[in-house]
Image (cartoon, grey):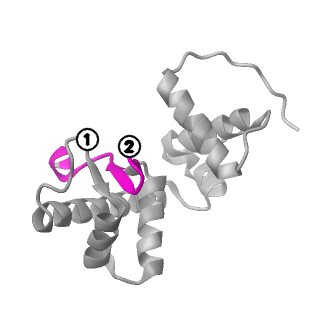
Amino acid sequence: MHEKVKVTVCLDRKVVQKLRELIAEKHKTFVKGLLSHEVEEALRYWVALHKNAQSSAVAEKFLGKTRVEVLLEASRVERAFHQVCTWLEAYRPGLITRAGEVPLTALRKAISEVRGSDPRTIKKWLKLFHEHGLIMPGSRVGWIRLMKTQSATA
């Protein structure tokens, strides 16, 4: 086992709260050690993505993908998200609130129009958008916050 080192950092209160909520949701509980585990995993991921080209083997071992594959997937997901946002703005004008929130049903409809209507496809894109930090739960039940809207990415 690797030696553990205590590190003290100062983070925004809201970021820490969201992290704790995400961990509790992911693990269905929040017990001692989970925060450290998840922060360490996040840091490993970040380091693997940001190392120079010589270290792409490390990223491949950690992520199961090369650094280029990871970056291509991110751009593919962001491109799909941009298409979904564009569809929402074109076919459902005024639906996106000032806070960047839309009903989940509208987001599902936009994904089905842009990427395909199979429930597995819709579920896959919702999951990818969430994993890439492009969407998060909204302030109301059944609403989703778009972290980057069409106007923000243009």
Residue 27 image offset from top left, x and y in percent: 70, 50
Answer with the quarter of the image where residue 94 lies: bottom left
Which residue is label 2 attached to? 139
Residue located 66% across and 56% down the image = 61
Q: Is residue 130 magenta?
A: no
- Relative height, residue 112 to residue 49 (above, below): below
Residue closer to the observer: 140 or 33: 140
Q: Is 90 displayed left or right of 139 in the figure? A: left
Task: Based on the picture, tell me whether residue 138 belongs to the magenta stretch.
Answer: yes
**Residue type beneath disc 1:** Ala
Cα separation, mark 1 vs mark 2, equals: 9 Å
Answer with left or right where residue 73 lies relative to residue 82: right
Vertical arrangement, residue 149 with respect to residue 87, above or below: above
Q: Identify the residue at horizontal 74%, vertical 38% (top origin).
A: 34
Evaluate if marks 1 and 2 touch, with contact meaning CB atoms under 8 Å apart: yes
Q: Answer above or below: position of 33 versus 141.
A: above
Secondary structure at numbered mark 2: loop
Q: Which residues are magenta?
A: 136-153
Q: Could you say which quadrant of the image residue 73 lies in?
A: bottom left
- Residue behind mark 1: 99
Q: Residue 122: x percent and y percent?
A: 41, 73
Numbered badge on residue 15? none
Looking at the rendered image, the quarter that the N terminus falls into is: top right
